[in-house]
Amino acid sequence: GKIAALTLTTEDEQTPINAEIEHFIHIISAIAIFLGVSFFGIGFGFGQDITSALVFMIGIIVANVPEGLLATVTVSLTLTAVKMFKKQVRVKNLEGVETLGSTSCICSDKTGTLTQNIMTVAQIVYGGASGFNIEDCASSFTRGNKTYDENNPSFKKLQRCATLCNTAFFEPTSMTDPETGEKKPFLAQVLQGDGSFITQVAWEPAQGCNASEVAMIKFTQPLRDVLEYRNRCPIIKDATIPFNSKNKYQVHVHCQEEYQPEGSTSPEDNTGPRIVCMKGAPERVIGRCSHALVNGELVQMTAQLKEEIAELQLQLSENGLRVLGFAEKEMPLNQYPPDFVFEPNPAGFSTANYPLGEFMNHQGESKDDQKEGDPPHPNSLEGLVFLGLMALVDPPRPAVPGAVNKCKTAGIKVIMVTGDHPITAQAIAYKVGILWSKTKNIMELENKRYNRHPGDAGWQDPDDARAIVVPGHTIDAEMGEDKWDAILEHPQIVFARTSPQQKLIIVENCKRVGHIVAVTGDGVNDAPALKAANIGVAMGITGTEVSKRAADMILLDDNFASIVNGVEEGRLIFDNL
């Protein structure tokens, strides 16, 4: 409802070409009227009768009207729109063709636009015999190296949570050979042009599945069949809390397989205790945990343990990996019997009626997460058990660094606006060229690391940093224009962990300082910012129908480089007109 209200209250603004044509018409009209009145006076002064002078005046005014302007503009815009379609950009609003050419600032999403949105689990963290450590998974990031122990009880719980708290699945038709009807192996050896073989996943994920969740089931499938595991641990469907950009977590409630009768997939047949499975942004998940699982044993989540886990998360994020946290809670039967009705939105309460770790507030969590005036449900205050982290690698698109460089040379500012962790966003921004100099935080860390103070050799003044990474929790609607001006004057900017409302505020302030802003987005939450921008660009593959309706253009290949191609065509039409 809030997203819809934001979208509906965001007003459409005049496009640059509209403003140019209006200005041109005003000038032509003034000249035509001036000439008409002048010749009317001259004719009348030379003895013409008033009727002839009036007709002559009207003829002069009409002769100055550019009747072919509308046709010329429409044809030019249409021809350019056809060219842009061939370059994977579908135009919904013809005037947007020229607007894209006038763009001076692009606010781009990261996942799927700057990156390939083909994720792989690269590293994981779980509590082994020596505590929580980073372990490698077989991926290109780790050069095929694998160090985790798949028989460790803590790893098995992490595997279970990643499998169950997940809505992705494999397309059934991709799992069988169409000729023989036999089931295909999950992994296949693919012959390369040089005669070598590489191992690839032969099964295809179903269309519309989240890329992060697909990466998880590709990781867990070789360990145990995902569909079979889910059938043995039936989901309590009405208890699910889907992921959203406010909560930044997803919750499922499942039965446990050891209490599930053979041959049954119904939760009604399971008489054992249910489990809450949560995954989401690590800082949100860790803060909700009162305990952690280390080598299969429960331990208290102390401040020191939180710091250790946060340091491991930081190491993963610095490598440009997208990190997700996992937690669970087994609910006792005396409090949550098999016939207990799990409700994510019980009447009169702001939270679910089962454990969510609401016992403490989290940095950056908004009061908007709660229904105004309603208290949290007492059951939701129970703490969860932290299981571990999964770090996903999502490599940048090969064409993006070159496209970003083109934007720099064309005088276009590229700003990354993402929901990912600031350190992850910063690492990817350096890889694609949105950041190329040290940020304020990096300068402060280096000064601290080498014990440098003002006046010392090598000391760097953080206030001189040309790059900045702005976390979402530092942005609000009450921020003054002077603070926004100080942020936006940086030539290199990344906004991380942002909400839809914050994205809208960012766009509005970019426009306020004089930029013609293009915004990319793919979700329902992006609709307000897409509509508020001078030109909204939706994703054709991963984009929702809501975002496509709010946008002026659609990238058919979800590629940032296609936007730059569109800018080139837009600039050509501006010059031609």
Image: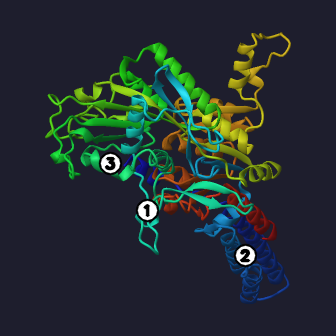
Q: Nearer the viewer, residue 229 or 551?
A: 229
Q: Earlier in the sequence, mark 3 or mark 2?
A: 2
The disc label shown at residue 76, or none: 2
Residue depicted at x 51% and y 51%: 211
- Mark 2, mark 1: which one is toward the viewer? 1
Q: Is residue 68 left or right of residue 279?
A: right
Q: Which residue is mark 3?
A: 230
> Looking at the image, is 30 positioned above or below residue 343?
below
Task: Check disc 3 and give the amino acid type.
Answer: Arg
Q: Is residue 359 left or right of residue 552?
A: left
Question: At numbered mark 2, what does the secondary structure look like: helix, strand or loop?
Answer: helix
Q: Is residue 158 left or right of residue 397?
A: left
Give the Cα distance between marks 3 and 2: 56 Å
* One can see residue 318 in this view: yes
Q: Which residue is mark 1?
A: 171
Task: Check disc 2 and give the amino acid type.
Answer: Ser
The disc label shown at residue 203, or none: none
Label 2 near label 3: C-beta < 8 Å?
Answer: no
Task: Check disc 1 and give the amino acid type.
Answer: Glu
Q: In the rendered picture of this protein, how many numbered marks are placed on residues? A: 3
